[in-house]
Image: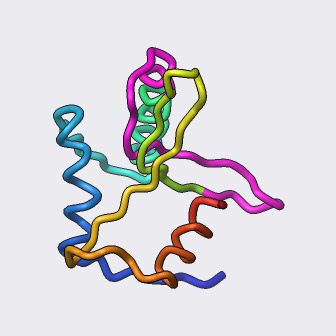
Amino acid sequence: MAHFKSRKTTFFLYGCFCPELQDHNLVPVKTRSREDRWAIKLLNVLLTITNLREGQRVRECPVFGVLEGVFVFGVIDQLNYTAKGELQLNELKTREKAYMPVPAQKKKDRFQVGQ
């Protein structure tokens, strides 16, 4: 199994953290074990489902499952229901510079959300 270490830039961290502050206050929770961290993730899933069912917009929605025999875990940037009652997925991108992405970047982003 390959392990990749990602380089998290200041812009990446800002993009992850800032939208959360727009919707609600974050509460720091100290964990001591891997099980504690997974328990927090599962609680976040339950709260996210509850909020989404109540018609609220949810951000940083954790998703997980088994795909072709492999357990996968990820995060959806934003989910909400439209006025027509359709579930809408939004992939938000934080850009380092104030210009639109080049076609290659757009193509990569389409693969990320499965379009």
Work out whether 65 lies above or below 79: below
Q: Nearer the viewer, residue 114 or 70?
A: 114
Q: In the shown orientation, is residue 72 left or right of residue 105? A: right
**Residue lying at 18% horizontally and 74% vertically, measured from the top left:** 10
Q: Residue at x 57, y 32 (%)?
A: 87
Q: Magenta span covers which residues?
A: 49-72
- Image spot of residue 72 (x, y percent): 64, 58
Judged left or right of residue 27, residue 95 is right
**Res 94 → quadrant:** bottom left
Q: Please provide percent x and percent y for residue 24.
A: 21, 32
Check the image and report above or below for 67 versus 25.
Answer: below
Count of numbered badges drawn on the protein: 0
Give the side of residue 18 with respect to residue 90, left or right. left
Which quadrant of the rendered structure holds the N terminus? bottom right
> What residue is at 47 percent from the left and 45 percent from the top?
38
- Residue 39 % position (x, y): 45, 38
In the displayed structure image, the side of residue 87 where residue 68 appears, left or right: right
Q: Quadrant of the C terminus?
A: bottom right
Is 80 covered by the magenta stretch?
no
Front in this rendered view, residue 56 or 74: 56
Looking at the image, which is closer to me, 94 or 35? 94
Extreme-top residue of the structure = 54
Which residue lies at the image location 74% right of the left edge and 62% below the top edge? 70
Q: Residue 13 appears at what percent x and percent y?
A: 24, 65
How is colour applied across the structure in the image?
rainbow
